[in-house]
Image (cartoon, coloured by chain):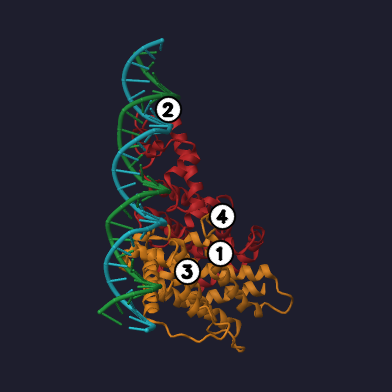
Chain colours: A orange, B red, C cyan, D green
Amino acid sequence: MDIEVQKRTNSTDNQVSVEETPPSRTEKRAAKTRNKLLNAALAVFSELGVDAATIDLITERADLGKGTFYRHFSDKYDIAGELVEQAIDHLVGRLREMEDDPMASLEDVLEHFLNAHYAFFRHHQDEFVLLFQGRLLLKLERQSTERMEAPFAQYLEEIEAQLTPYLGERKVDLVRVRRLACAVAGFVFGFFSFAMIGMEPEDIATSIKPLRQSFVKSLSLFLTQ
Amino acid sequence: MDIEVQKRTNSTDNQVSVEETPPSRTEKRAAKTRNKLLNAALAVFSELGVDAATIDLITERADLGKGTFYRHFSDKYDIAGELVEQAIDHLVGRLREMEDDPMASLEDVLEHFLNAHYAFFRHHQDEFVLLFQGRLLLKLERQSTERMEAPFAQYLEEIEAQLTPYLGERKVDLVRVRRLACAVAGFVFGFFSFAMIGMEPEDIATSIKPLRQSFVKSLSLFLTQ
DNA sequence: TCCATAAATGACTATTTAGTCATTTGTGAC
DNA sequence: GTCACAAATGACTAAATAGTCATTTATGGA
């Protein structure tokens, strides 16, 4: 059985009714190896940055042979792309947790945003660092840029989707929403990134409360100007 | 004449009265070469990122031999450190332009901050991208991290120095100022970085006015909470 | 003009890293 | 047990990059 085949039969085949074969031991072994690689790569990327990381470092960390890496991923940027997608999924998942509560006020939503970002930053610090590597946020002319940028676009769109209902009745001004989403994302990511070099961890934690207040007020201004 | 010697006699010797030798043609030639390398490296770093850049790319871009690079810098991170220092100096210089105007209100200062950052972002985009590469903002475990972080600390301190007078009479709460500086820096850098992937250039420009309003209000809240 | 010294050069070697593949190990059907 | 095939391996080759140094070019003083 080839890895490609396994993927097709087990995970992405949920449109037509297919008898769900329970994963065989071989399949579980491959999945476990794959996850080991993903975890090791995340750690290495967050320590050294994607460009400075090497395949050898990843496989050594995962305690696997080098050839194994190429059995599962085509290169560094392949696995990095997957990790970025995964991290954005986590973050977007948190953002959605509150979604279709029709009683939520704008301030509730904004507060929820901040909490979600903060929780993500606290509990998935490696993923935060990965996402925040400048190469991924700025348009550096690297290979596979598209794959790296797509998840960020998805993330901005998620923020936009949740804020749009509060933007008033007149037809939605796309630039205005996008600006808002950039402000939200930029503020939160930017604050934490500077806080990491400028503050002690406990000080970052105590910064959240006052941050939230003015953050919410400031965004309301954006919306109602 | 060696480069080390030249450096010592001409630039860093301003404590004791030394007859200012006008730069010789040889010295000017070396300085010009050095600048060519700095410019080329800035361009390459901002296109590819520091880690993905190579010495060959830098010297080719500068139209110089490879050996020349090693005559002026010890490696990639050496020249990157110098460029970061240089960029922070530019940015801090802009921040200082308004400094000792005793009539300036807090809102004047904050507005000036935003303008200064925006002007820097607009006119020194390569330097902005260099500064914003995650490796420099987050504590990636790389060589010469210290040299990379020191300029950012200087930048945060500059913001703190300018904002401290507005923090009220009671003894200054260091954490509070630091938090404020992180918020300023994070918001501005973060916004532009997300705007770069999420917005068209002209939309970024028109975002500045509304951004300024709520930014200033939001920071006032930080200060007066 | 000629000499002494600094600056620049780029072909070269050394080193690091990517990527391959013949071989070994694990799994499952019979 | 044994056969067939997938997964994992790591020694290997190929490629990219760092860093060196004998040589050439430019500069300034005598």
> Which residue matches tag 4?
B121
Residue A3 lies in quadrant: bottom left
Marking on residue A82: 3
Q: How far from the left and from the top, in percent, is residue B30?
A: 43, 33
Residue type at mark 1 is Phe
Residue type at mark 3 is Glu
| Marks 4 and 3 share the same chain | no
Q: How far from the left and from the top, in percent, is residue A45?
A: 40, 64
Residue A104 lies in quadrant: bottom right
Using the image, name the chain to which the residue with label 3 belongs: A
Does A38 sit left or right of C15 as displayed? right
Using the image, name the chain to which the residue with label 4 belongs: B
Residue type at mark 4 is Phe
Dot 1 falls on a residue whose secondary structure is: helix
Dot 3 falls on a residue whose secondary structure is: helix
Q: Are marks 2 and 4 in contact (CB under 8 Å)?
A: no
Within 10 Å of disc 2 (Cα), the crowding (few <14, some 14-19, many 20+) is few
Using the image, name the chain to which the residue with label 2 belongs: B
Q: Are marks 1 and 3 in contact (CB under 8 Å)?
A: no
Counting every numbered tag in the picture gives 4
Residue found 45% across the figure and 60% down from its top: B134
> Which residue matches tag 1?
B194
Q: Point out the image quarter for the C terminus of chain A.
A: bottom right
Task: Tell me if I can see residue B88 in this picture.
Answer: yes
CA gap, disc 2 to disc 1?
Answer: 45 Å
Q: Are marks 3 and 2 in contact (CB under 8 Å)?
A: no
Residue found 39% across the figure and 54% down from its top: B148
Q: Nearer the viewer, mark 2 or mark 1?
A: 1
Residue D19 sits above or below residue B214 on the image: above
